[in-house]
């Protein structure tokens, strides 16, 4: 019984860390995303290259959590659906917006999948971005892969 309780506690701690790792608070968004990319690569065997803008990006807690969760969800979708072997992701600030781009070399999402009402992961990505006045663009090319681009304003204004 105590072994089961210990396993449950570890599982809850792991899930909690994945939802909002302490790295996000302690070291910032860039470090948390680097950690997530490495965890993804180690867990799935899918190569994940992350390119970050030249300066460390400082955002309020809500925006950094949203971008981090969007990144997690794109990686989850790649694991579940893409049959990819490689992911290239970038995070940069340009023209007052934070831009996250995640590109895989998988089978490519279809327009039907993008607009499907039960695509809850994609709905979550859109809702998180729209909550900050941002936008999401999803493009798939059959046999070549999918690109998800998310941009949200850096300032609250």
Image (cartoon, rainbow, N blue to C red):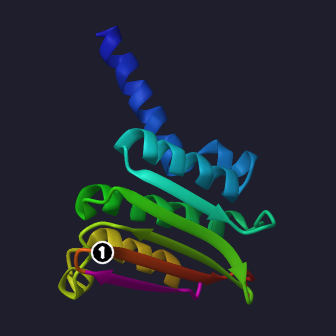
Q: Residue furthest right?
A: 55
Q: Is residue 16 above or below residue 101?
A: above
Q: Residue at x 35, y 18 (%)?
A: 5
- Residue 30 image point, x, y percent: 68, 57
Kindly report the secondary structure that dominates the magenta region of the rendered protein: strand
- Residue 108 image point, x, y percent: 27, 75
Residue 92: name its quadrant: bottom right
- The span picked out in magenta is 131-141
- Left or right of 2: which side holds 25? right
In the picture, the quarter occupied by the N terminus is top left
Q: Which residue lies furthest to the top in this view?
A: 2
Q: Residue at x 43, y 77 (%)?
A: 148
Q: In this view, does 155 lie above or below 83?
A: below
- Residue 58 image point, x, y percent: 78, 66
- Left or right of 70: which side holds 152? right
Q: Can residue 131 be seen in this view?
A: no
- Of the pair 142 and 52, the residue shown nearer to us: 142
- Check disc 1 and report its element: helix, strand or loop: loop
Q: Which residue is drawn at 44% across and 46% down?
A: 41
């Amino acid at each position: 019984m105590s072994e089961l309780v210990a396993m449950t506690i570890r599982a809850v701690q792991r899930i909690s860390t994945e939802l909002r790792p302490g790295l996000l608070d302690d070291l910032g968004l860039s470090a948390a995303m680097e950690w997530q990319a490495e965890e993804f690569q180690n867990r799935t065997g899918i190569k994940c290259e992350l390119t970050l803008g030249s300066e460390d990006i400082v955002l309020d807690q809500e925006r950094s959590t949203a971008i981090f969760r969007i990144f997690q969800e794109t990686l989850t979708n790649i694991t579940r659906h893409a049959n990819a072997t490689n992911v290239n992701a970038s995070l940069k600030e340009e023209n007052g917006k934070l831009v996250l781009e995640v590109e895989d070399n998988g089978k490519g999402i279809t327009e039907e999948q993008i607009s499907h009402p039960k695509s809850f992961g994609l709905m979550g990505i859109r809702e998180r971005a729209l909550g900050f006045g941002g936008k999401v663009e999803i493009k798939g090319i059959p046999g070549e892969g999918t690109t998800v681009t998310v941009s949200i304003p850096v300032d609250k204004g």
